[in-house]
Amino acid sequence: MNDKILIIRLSSIGDIIQCMSVVSGIKEKYPNSEIHWVVRSDLASLLKIDPRIDHLWEFDRKKGFKGVIELGFQLRKEGYDFVYDAHSNIRSNILKAILCPLGLCQLNLVTRYKARFKRFLLFKFRLNLLPKPFKALASFQKPIEKWGIQEFNVPFEGWLFKEEINQKVDALVLSQIPDNVNWITIVPSAAWSLKRWPVEYWRTLAELKSDCYFVILGGPNDSFCEEIRSVAPERIINLAGKTSLIESFCVVRNSQFVISGDTGFLHAADLFHKKGIALIGPTAFGFPSSPNIKVMEVNLPCRPCTKDGSVKCKLKEEKKCLYDIKPEMVAAQIDLMIE
């Protein structure tokens, strides 16, 4: 009889992408397992690109805790052998309590805890008891080592994007780039400005790497992306606001090289084993795991100062951790990695 495994990770974009790395480990250890996943309905499209996930339980957060309880009793009927709570929040704890009342059940149950107290010590008192660097993919993989899973970096090429998505990426990107020309996907945006490499640095990088095409990923409000494109509009493709989230991930999947700060797109490049550069500034938990991605950072005593970039820089020389990563340094690293 095949093992039946449930993963609970409801959100967010970056965390779901990073948690998806556990599927390869599960399939390597339990090749005939049936994998189910509980995810917020508005983010389910991310998981649909992995055909190894057999069933998605889409949770509508508008249904509130009543919906969580109803879902829990539905899941209980499935008879899971293994349950991985990769979220560890109120909703996932309710689901676990229904699946395994008082912990008295035959489930092989593991949980990824967020080390909240250690995070408090780090940001409040500069006492770092967390792994350094903190590789988020590895943090999602660690709990299920209790299931005897040790190998996670098994190559997987069977990602499934809908045909209309592939066609759109081909029309917007692949068909626009000449054969035998290197091209680089760049992600100049981030949820918080503190995590963003300066726009003028992106412009300089595009000028320095005149032998490459660039593809910009961003949102509809990222008007500064057009400033970058204006440096060399003949070889810079600005997709800001032109692609959906899943279409943008398809661009990353097709990319030769990716440069990003601590964003969901960096984690996607990590998951897809793409070559690239991670520009890590103030944040603590965005380090990639893949050896294909080079981390570029500046060693400052104030780093890391935030988990997500939502604070104000305390230095007089604001964002020094990113400003000190010069475009010339990044261009030289590109040359090393592409060659």
Image: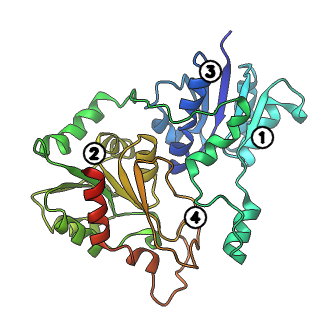
Amino acid found under the numbered disc labelled 3 = Tyr
Give the label, 3 or 1, closer to the camera: 3
- Give me the C-alpha separation between circle 3 and circle 1: 27 Å
Give the alpha-carbon distance from disc 3 to disc 2, as whole Å. 32 Å
Q: Residue at x 59, y 65 (%)?
A: 307
Above/below status of 155 relative to 227: above
| Image side of residue 85 versus residue 209, left or right | right
Q: Of callouts 4 and 1, which one flags the residue occurring earlier in the amino acid sequence?
A: 1
| N-terminal-most mark, 4 or 3 | 3
Residue, disc 3:
30
State the residue lying farthest toward the bottom: 316
- Quadrant location of the N terminus? top right
For residue 52, above or below residue 280: above
Question: Closer to the observer: label 4 or label 1?
Answer: 4
Tell me, for residue 284, which label it has, or none.
4
Q: Residue at x 57, y 71 (%)?
A: 304
Tell me the CA gap for discs 4 and 1. Answer: 29 Å
The kind of residue tagged 2 is: Gln
Asked where in the image residue 294 lies, by quadrant, the reply is bottom left
How far apart are the two marked residues, 2 and 4, measured between alpha carbons?
A: 27 Å
Name the residue carrying label 1: 94
Where's residue 81, x and y in %? 74, 22
Q: Residue beneath label 2, please?
A: 256
- Crowding at dot 4, Cα within 10 Å, few <14 / some 14-19 / many 20+, comes out as many
Q: CA distance from mark 4 to mark 3?
A: 33 Å
Q: Are marks 4 and 1 in contact (CB under 8 Å)?
A: no
Q: Residues within 10 Å of mark 2 (few under 14, many from 20)?
A: some
